[in-house]
Image (tube, coloured by chain):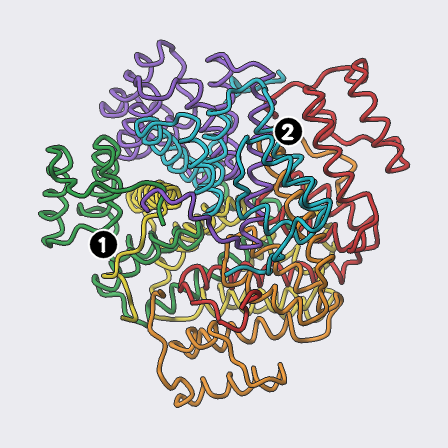
Chain colours: A yellow, B green, C red, D orange, E cyan, F purple
Amino acid sequence: MSTLKPAAEPESNARVKAVFDDIRATRKSDFVNNFWRYLAFDPQLLEETWAGVKSVMAMPSALDPLTKEMLYIAVSMTNACRYCVHSHTAAARAKGMTDDMYADLLRVVSTAARTNQLLNGIQVPVDDAFEADP
Amino acid sequence: MSTLKPAAEPESNARVKAVFDDIRATRKSDFVNNFWRYLAFDPQLLEETWAGVKSVMAMPSALDPLTKEMLYIAVSMTNACRYCVHSHTAAARAKGMTDDMYADLLRVVSTAARTNQLLNGIQVPVDDAFEADP
Amino acid sequence: MSTLKPAAEPESNARVKAVFDDIRATRKSDFVNNFWRYLAFDPQLLEETWAGVKSVMAMPSALDPLTKEMLYIAVSMTNACRYCVHSHTAAARAKGMTDDMYADLLRVVSTAARTNQLLNGIQVPVDDAFEADP
Amino acid sequence: MSTLKPAAEPESNARVKAVFDDIRATRKSDFVNNFWRYLAFDPQLLEETWAGVKSVMAMPSALDPLTKEMLYIAVSMTNACRYCVHSHTAAARAKGMTDDMYADLLRVVSTAARTNQLLNGIQVPVDDAFEADP
Amino acid sequence: MSTLKPAAEPESNARVKAVFDDIRATRKSDFVNNFWRYLAFDPQLLEETWAGVKSVMAMPSALDPLTKEMLYIAVSMTNACRYCVHSHTAAARAKGMTDDMYADLLRVVSTAARTNQLLNGIQVPVDDAFEADP
Amino acid sequence: MSTLKPAAEPESNARVKAVFDDIRATRKSDFVNNFWRYLAFDPQLLEETWAGVKSVMAMPSALDPLTKEMLYIAVSMTNACRYCVHSHTAAARAKGMTDDMYADLLRVVSTAARTNQLLNGIQVPVDDAFEADP
């Protein structure tokens, strides 16, 4: 159940078709997942969102593609975003994340959440040693 | 300003001293940061927390130490934990995170937050293709 | 699947009936949505919650009704509250939110989430110029 | 205290200068707030972030500028982003938000957080009546 | 630094004075903490908020006052609300929370955050055995 | 739908069997809920997580078992963790939480979320009176 009804034929809109074509070309796959199909109700929102995700996740950059997918999972878990957790865990597996790596990711993010709680509770003062701009 | 006053000489407690000694030995440094000094008000809480963090962050595992620090930063940013952001950004830099890598991490986590919002708003149904257990 | 079983005939309780009657009268509709039916397991919780929502959302105030519904959606998306997202998106549409307005709302809240992440990560100092009480 | 040290003369970098010039021109003001000064450590991150914020917040769109600022505040409060709360509350006041409107915004977002909690706790099933795609 | 400037003499407004008087009478103390002093910029917001907090926290109910304060701390830590963490930790101590109890609270809430992360990550299906309404 | 497929016979792994045996012995029940069945894909993650939960939730400590379950619910609601809300509400009921107590818990946590929002919005300065370490 969603808050909007996606168009039956979204690619009848030229702007939507251009984005979908770029998604297929970038990913070398015919599959366009639901996220983009639902965003297509507004071509500008679709274009801006795809441009942002493509630039960060599909272009070479300082971090390797798998590390970027794992960071994406970490944030999505923390924000309780069910769809993002599913789509980016699938993407991470496709890029080589093994069960051992996934288990390790889960160990790190759950430990982070645990100490985040403690520090937001105790309100420990930040050490001067961590100052980036002394 | 914190919710508790740390002991002036926490290591006068033998259980606290044992943990602090292990922190110094594990990290090969004399520096014990405030988090542990404040947790020391309760030796059991200190012991359990350090054991958990040490096992995940200081022991070899499937992910490399820098990737683990970056995942820790990603979760801490999302949970708005100021102390954790500072301590783990400092740790990541100490383990080799360059400005380029840090900028890339910021690009990924802010993009994740952006699409998390969209999906939690539209409530897009998860594609069957992402099913791990068909 | 819920954490409690709603009563089969909640309005057999006079306090519950009084609230449901007020919901119907305030909204000029026979429809009482599930939120209130589940809260009815405790008449005091039901009364307090309805009084709060009615005062803020159903009474004339400085902001117009549609703006208030959109603010409600923005918070509910950020808190990953699936029910609230659905009920308040429906309410906003009923009060005149078009697809164009909804797309714009999604653009704003996803951009806010994006920069919230960056600022919670970098911990940028607040400019003096933003001081409300110099 | 921040996680990075901003450059003393960020505009000695041509890409940074171009963004700062556009910020000043767009806002018709000489003031460039700290957010952009800190993001300037990475010109690509600065360019992408400014392009996103400008497109959504500084260009005419379906919602009026003040409504957009108030939505931005609502998300920033929920994400506990101190900087964003300050900068966007200042921006909303500059665009005409009175004390009465601000109080009303606070009433709505705090009521939303209250019912979000109840619904995430009780896990009330979403009514069929809210279905956008029957 | 706050987003508004509190009135120098808030009690010159009769509605504000009535609320402050009730706070003092309810708490049997002359101290009115900053939260109420800042909310006083809008008497309706002040009245509604105090009425809600008083009804839940200052009136006898099914849970004892200390348990209620500890629940308040747990939510405030999770929402990263610094002020609330401080005010309700002080209130819990005033109502009898010892260091041992505080340490135990911290152990529980940090463990909850840890498993919340795991479950939001793995998306484990809810067992039928937990169904409240079979 | 989950991000991993649990093993058909997880207890064929000796480490998993040892944890499941301990869960059954600790809880004096044959029921092992899905959380542990899914975590079993990685014996180390399973062992560490169970050890943490057992130590905090199943061992006598400063707070009574029911108060600990209610704190767990409060955090899980705030983190929008559907599974945890269901499992810990069921556990709290099994330990004696009545409908009246549950309603009171809901009143407290929803009021906390309401004032958390106000304070994260207004950024009220913390009173000196709350200082634990003057």
Q: Is residue D124 visible?
A: yes
Give the SS element for disc 1.
helix
Residue lying farthest top? Answer: F28
Q: Which mark is residue B65?
A: 1
Give the SS element for disc 2.
helix
Q: Of discs 2 and 1, which sits in the foreground?
A: 2
Residue C97 pos. (x, y %): 79, 55
Type of the residue with mark 1:
Pro
Nearer to me, B70 or C124: C124
- Above or below, comparing residue C109 to residue F53 in the picture: below
Residue B27 pos. (x, y %): 13, 51
- Above or below, comparing residue F22 to residue A41 in the picture: above
Type of the residue with mark 2:
Ser
Read off the chain for label 2. E
Instruction: Report which residue position mark 2 lands on.
Output: E55
Mark 1 and mark 2 in contact (Cβ < 8 Å)? no
Nearer to me, B120 or B42: B42
User: What residue do we see at 30% from left, 18% from top?
Assistant: F59
- Above or below, comparing residue A104 to residue A65 in the picture: above
Nearer to me, E77 or A107: E77
User: What residue do we see at 32% from left, 31% from top?
Assistant: E103
